[in-house]
Image: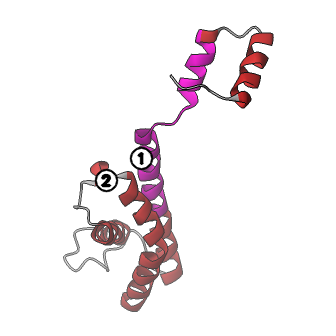
Amino acid sequence: MRPIGPEADVLLQQLAEMEVDPEQAAAEIRRRRMTRQDRREARRASLHERIQNEVGRIMGQAGINPGGRTLDRRRRNTNFEWTVAEFNRRVNERVGGVNADRQNFSLEQLDQAHEALEGLAQQLRDEVGRNAP
């Protein structure tokens, strides 16, 4: 085990003075430490939320009824569903992922997706605006 350094020594002394149990302190540190998987899950949820919000913004700016069926040529999905699916397809394509496989995206792929979101949203906004009724 490597030495923890002077800053940690000061913190340990403060914990000792507060009479914090070492097991309690260790449990709290483990609870607060974010694992790579935790970060990945948070980034994936954040990506989903950002896409949903962006699609809502696109619908509003284009004056398209989210519940209508004008964007899907087959008329199977609502405008909102179709736009979310199209946005997801483009995100997946940009980061080299497979549709319906986002749970297996690496943290790096999720970071790339977040970085690409703005540009992809603008492309989709332009296309949807041109096709608006």
Percent x, y of residue 107: 39, 52
Percent x, y of residue 31: 54, 26
Q: Is residue 132 visible?
A: no
Quickly name the residue at label 2: 105
At a point 41% along the width and 44% down the height, the residue shown is 41
Residue 102 lies within the magenta run:
no
Q: Is residue 123 visible?
A: yes
Magenta stretch, main secondary structure, is helix
The way the protein has been coloured in the rendering is: secondary structure
Q: Is residue 15 left or right of residue 62?
A: right
- Disc 1 packing (10 Å; few <14; some 14–19; many ≥20): many
Percent x, y of residue 33: 54, 32
Looking at the image, is 39 positioned above or below residue 121? above
- Disc 2 packing (10 Å; few <14; some 14–19; many ≥20): some
Range covered by the magenta-colored residues: 23-52
Under mark 2, the amino acid is Phe
At a point 36% along the width and 66% down the height, the residue shown is 84
Looking at the image, is 6 positioned above or below residue 126? above
Percent x, y of residue 35: 46, 37
- The secondary element bearing badge 1 is classed as helix
Looking at the image, is 103 positioned above or below residue 93? above
- Compare residues 46 and 110 and report the one nearer the observer: 110
At a point 24% along the width and 56% down the height, the residue shown is 100
Quarter-of-image position of residue 112? bottom left
- Compare residues 3 and 48 and report the one nearer the observer: 3
Q: Is residue 9 left or right of residue 122?
A: right
